[in-house]
Image (tube, helix red, strand yellow):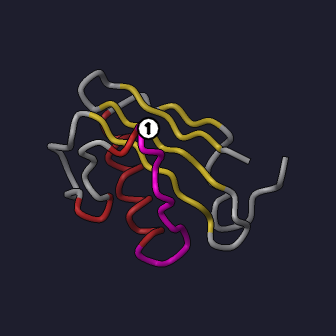
């Protein structure tokens, strides 16, 4: 498996969300990294596109959509990640793809 770089090394191979604060921090961190061009959003598969709110349009705090799914890529090392947030059921995770 490819090694992460300094820009995305704070993400583990799998990160589980355990509290609402974890969700809020993940969303705001991801938005910040996209705004700084550290990460780029990769278009999701059609199965997950649905009626998804654009990441950068999400507010900094709840309420959030019930289900959120984004794919993003580190612009330096090109490792891709999936982030899945199920605000309604209180679960979510970040998965490394490569």
Q: Label 1: how many residues lie within 10 Å, few (<14), some (14-19) or many (20+)?
A: some
Residue at the bottom extreme of this rendering: 36
On whether residue 97 falls in the magenta region, the answer is no
The percent coordinates of residue 41 (x first, y second) are: 47, 63
Mark 1 element type: strand
Please name the residue shown 50% across and 77% down the image.
37
The percent coordinates of residue 85 (x first, y second) are: 37, 36
The percent coordinates of residue 11 (x first, y second) are: 61, 49
Q: Nearer the viewer, residue 1 or 15?
A: 1
Q: Which residue is mark 1?
A: 84
> In the rendered image of this protein, does residue 40 appear above or below residue 88?
below
Q: Is 98 on the left-hand or right-hand side of 59?
A: right
Please name the residue shown 63% across and 72% down the image.
75
Please name the residue shown 29% across and 42% down the image.
50
Residue 19 occupies quadrant: top left
Task: Report the magenta residues as a range.
Answer: 35-47
Q: Is 55 on the left-hand or right-hand side of 70?
A: left
Please name the residue shown 42% across and 44% down the image.
46
Q: Is 19 on the left-hand or right-hand side of 42?
A: left
Residue at the left extreme of this rendering: 63
The percent coordinates of residue 1 (x first, y second) are: 85, 46
């Amino acid at each position: 498996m490819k090694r992460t770089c300094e820009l995305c090394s704070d993400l583990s191979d799998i990160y589980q969300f355990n509290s609402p604060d974890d969700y809020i921090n993940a969303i705001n961190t991801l938005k910040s990294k996209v705004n700084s061009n550290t990460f780029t959003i990769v278009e999701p598969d059609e199965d997950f596109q649905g009626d998804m709110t654009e990441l950068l349009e999400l507010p900094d705090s709840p309420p959030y959509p019930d289900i959120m799914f984004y794919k993003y890529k580190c612009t330096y090392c090109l490792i891709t990640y999936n982030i899945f947030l199920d605000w309604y059921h209180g679960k979510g995770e970040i998965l490394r793809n490569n």
